[in-house]
Image (tube, rainbow, N blue to C red):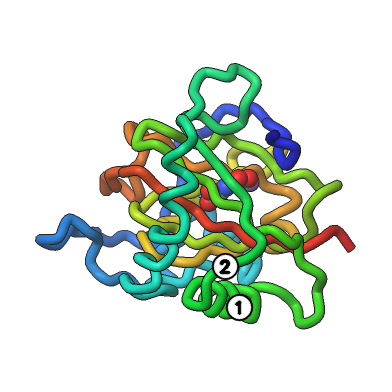
Amino acid sequence: MRLLLTVIKHTHKLPVYTSRLRCLSSCASGGLLPLRDEELILGSSRELVQGLGSQVEVRTAFITEEEEGAFLRELEPGLKKKRYEFDHWDDAIHGYRETERLRWGAACEEVLNRVRSVAFPEGSPLLGPVHVLDLDKTGYIKPHIDSVKFCGSTIAGLSLLSDSIMRLVRENASNEWLDLLLPRRSLYILRDQARYNFTHEILKDEESVFNGQRVPRQRRISVICRNLPG
Ligand code: OGA
Ligand code: MN
């Protein structure tokens, strides 16, 4: 089932540099205070963050609460029928259930068209079905690079239900890394080098700390669009 993934093991070095020192604080609702998009990316060096430039993007509040609700209404009935899968030692993902969907209701289709128009080059052929990944609160994604055989240069994902941290680590140079804070209802985009030369992972709740600030992980659903290899 997980054709897309190649797991790569590495040891993660401690941060040597943070691009910005800032405090995140939680508001009454338990969410994060509004952050500027450029405050959502932190890396091992300024050169790396700047060098990757637009190859890594996080856009906060890409969807509204209503749009998030539309996705949940559309996805929950199908997801609920599946069990979360744990403990496959060879699996890149722990504590997940997933599905793919080709046809969407109008509200979701409108959001997906917005994702497609900001993330992919015009005319770039996309992988037909959209990938939906439901991570349990205890679930996480180990470092991997999406299969170059099945997906192209760009990966774009919406995060529903929970904030989370995506970590990128350069293959064969684990001292070069980026952490992305993915707030609930944000969109992230990985392109080119960031997609091909860095592993990506979603941290487990216990490890979910961004710039010294704990970011509690809840159940998280991601809705991921990919293009086809060139
Ligand atoms: C994947 C993956 C990231 C996410 O399924 O290959 O990396 O945002 N998912 O769920
Ligand atoms: Mn992936």
Q: From the Cβ of disc 2, is ligand 1 less than 8 Å away?
A: no
* In this rendering, position of residue 51 left or right of residue 216: right
Percent across and percent down for residue 149 are 86, 47
- The answer to which of 20 and 76 lies nearer the viewer is 76
| Residue placed furthest toward the right | 230
Pointer 1 or 2: first along the chain: 2
Percent across and percent down for residue 119 are 64, 73
* In this rendering, position of residue 229 left or right of residue 205: right
> In this view of the protein, can residue 168 be seen by the observer?
no
Which residue is pictured at 58% across the width and 46% down the height? 99
Q: Residues within 10 Å of mark 1 (few under 14, many from 20)?
A: few
- The answer to which of 155 and 131 lies nearer the viewer is 131
- The answer to which of 34 and 157 lies nearer the viewer is 157
* In this rendering, position of residue 171 left or right of residue 31: right
Percent across and percent down for residue 206 are 32, 32
Question: Which residue is label 1 attached to?
Answer: 113
